[in-house]
Image: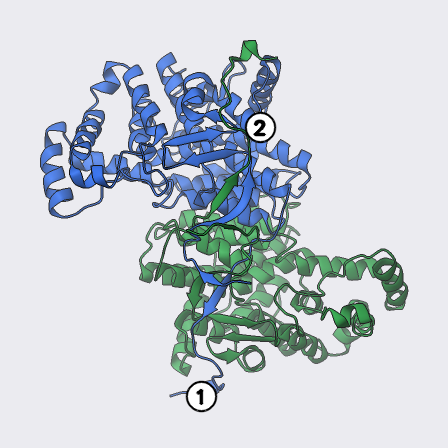
Chain colours: A green, B blue
Amino acid sequence: MAEEQKRGLEGAVIADTRLSRVMGDVGRLVYCGYEISDLADNATYEEVVFLLWNQRLPSAAELEALRKTLFSHMALSEAEIDVMRRLPVKAHPMGILRTAVSTVGVFDPEAEDNSPEANQRKALRLTAKMPTIIAAWSRIRTGKELLQPRADFSLAENFLYMLNGKPGSKPEVDALNAYLVLLADHGMNASTFTSRVVTSTDGDMYSAITAAIGSLKGPKHGGANEAAMRMFFEIGKPENVEKWFKDEVKGKGRRIMGVGHRVYKAFDPRADVLKRQVDKLGPGAKENPVFLIATGLEKQVMADPYFVERKLFPNVDYYSSIVLDAIGVDTDLQTPLFAMSRIAGWSAQVMEQWTDNRLIRPLDNYIGPMDLKWVPVNQRG
Amino acid sequence: MAEEQKRGLEGAVIADTRLSRVMGDVGRLVYCGYEISDLADNATYEEVVFLLWNQRLPSAAELEALRKTLFSHMALSEAEIDVMRRLPVKAHPMGILRTAVSTVGVFDPEAEDNSPEANQRKALRLTAKMPTIIAAWSRIRTGKELLQPRADFSLAENFLYMLNGKPGSKPEVDALNAYLVLLADHGMNASTFTSRVVTSTDGDMYSAITAAIGSLKGPKHGGANEAAMRMFFEIGKPENVEKWFKDEVKGKGRRIMGVGHRVYKAFDPRADVLKRQVDKLGPGAKENPVFLIATGLEKQVMADPYFVERKLFPNVDYYSSIVLDAIGVDTDLQTPLFAMSRIAGWSAQVMEQWTDNRLIRPLDNYIGPMDLKWVPVNQRG
């Protein structure tokens, strides 16, 4: 066996996949053969969920059946809500989501059944309950009453309804739907890889998804959209952009959050779609200072030789926080929204890992001392 | 970048480490320079915790300070216990442990502080609370009152006391202590690797440990000791061993749980120590049918050319279930006990990962279709 040190596993290919293809050099992202921009413009999130789970688009009847089944699993049990109500309101919502998903797992009588059929049912239940958990937490921590999902609503509609207590407008639902479509899968990113490592021990679906949530929580991964939003808040006003860019970025060498991507060396195709969604959200969103700050800063970046030469463009995190802010999602709930979309990809990847499972177990290189002699504690210096 | 497919990451070296060295070809395991058999014969678990966290043995004063600090963090808060009481008694105890550790994380005001100092404090709190969580769960699910830890006890003593409601005998405490020492770290195993992948996103300690628990839960990893125990129960009586081995193993080609190891191609040094511990536990343990079944089956294995030629010997999982059974740990609590020991290694590895952190993000190989044309749902066949 060749041993080569790769701290970030750079270039190591760990699986064949039929789910998504990230073509970073040309700025393309494909789910099961379909271009991401086609999906974001045309597909509902439910269609993408079906696509990732079945590697084909659903018929009209299959799509409606999936929507109904998702609705039927959306509500949380009283016991699950009861646990959530006992968690501290100041905690990071990603810690809450991690705990709530783990809790849903211990309540699921099928938790220990790793058959393909049970895994498909658990994927359904997790995809259905994720919006309910996030909306419930938003209302629990602000002392509001919880709402039940509505049978006639799509997943995006139900989330906005359960979050805000009233149905979202059509542009809001469309923007959220596009966001959910765009973030649903993305190759072997760190949280997806985490879910596959857990699965590789013959680990159960809930353990894999709980682990993936903890991984997505990290600021180098899903936490980046929150970091972009906090940067926009720091800039404060559109008229501050030029000076902030000059002082902080050019002067102090500060990194711009949400600009540049480890894989994309062209424009992130998802950022483009999200920017268009802000346009569709109307004057309120377009005149939002945060959007004006973001577009203003983008102009500075795109006109600066340093960024242009290195192909450092705004990525999905840069504009997703703007879209989520415009539809009323608190900054610290934005990474949970990422998880609410990505559950489609995580669960699909876990099921794919099960079709050809093998323990993922790399090596390390011991560089400490050897052959030390034991000395009893009372004889140590 | 060279791309080579390695589904199990065979031979990939992902980190330098000063923590443990697994020398599978010669049956040696070393923690920070000390031989595992020396540690199991002489060290307390607290000494090994200090060793893994500091890469040196403690002075007498440092050791007593660590024991006291661990004691001071051992008790769970009322709020944490309240959450645990609401979890279903039939759930897998590893699912409970995963949920409880995640819950402790959301209650910790330092959860989001990833500084080395905060990480060291969180490692302490997790190591201290793990025995309390497991003992509490054992009593909650059987309707017994919970017990507070005692200031004069070691971690092993406190666990047995909080589990059984009375102090353990000296042989019981010694056996548990040896078990905890033996399982505390083991190179880049799957759960440790999981904790490092989560950390690589700049993920927090609780997310990393929650993920590691989910990984250890898998039957191909920590779940193996439980599987060995269930096999002994299935055999039922010592006099059934020979026929079971002939019918099931030689006849039907069934795998013997707890025999053979992916890394050890010599006798697992930990199995040897554990077998000696059973001897020390006295007649009750040595005459336990389960122990007689295990030693009887080992004799069959060691006399069979198939196993001898392939160097398939009983590993740590084979005898750890016997030791844990002898000191009163239910079969389904044995993987949680593994986690209660391994928290020392996980937390040490997480802290080591932070000293030289880099996103762990491998690649996949897309083998699905490309350039499919979007067809609206009402036009699909």
Amino acid at circle 1: Asn
Marked residue chain, label 1 = B
Q: Would you say residue A74 is visible in this rendering?
A: no
User: At 53% from the left edge and 48% from the top edge, which residue is drawn?
Assistant: B14
Marked residue chain, label 2 = B
The residue sitting at the top extreme is A378
Secondary-structure class at tag 1: helix
Q: Position of residue A178 (x, y in %)?
A: 59, 74
Q: Position of residue B353 (x, y in %)?
A: 59, 42
Nearer to me, A71 or A126 = A126
Q: Mark 2 sits on what residue? A: B55
User: At 16% from the left edge and 38% from the top edge, which residue is drawn?
Assistant: B305
The residue sitting at the front extreme is A2
Nearer to me, A81 or B8 = B8
Q: Looking at the rendering, in which quadrant would you find the C terminus of chain B?
A: bottom left
User: At 55% from the left edge and 9% from the top edge, which residue is drawn?
Assistant: A378
**Left or right, B270 with reference to A157:** left
The residue sitting at the bottom extreme is B379
Rendering quarter of residue A334: bottom right
Name the disc covering residue B378, or none.
1
Mark 2 vs mark 1, CA separation in Å? 65 Å
**Left or right, B241 with reference to B332:** left
Q: Position of residue B338 (x, y in %)?
A: 41, 34
Secondary-structure class at tag 2: loop
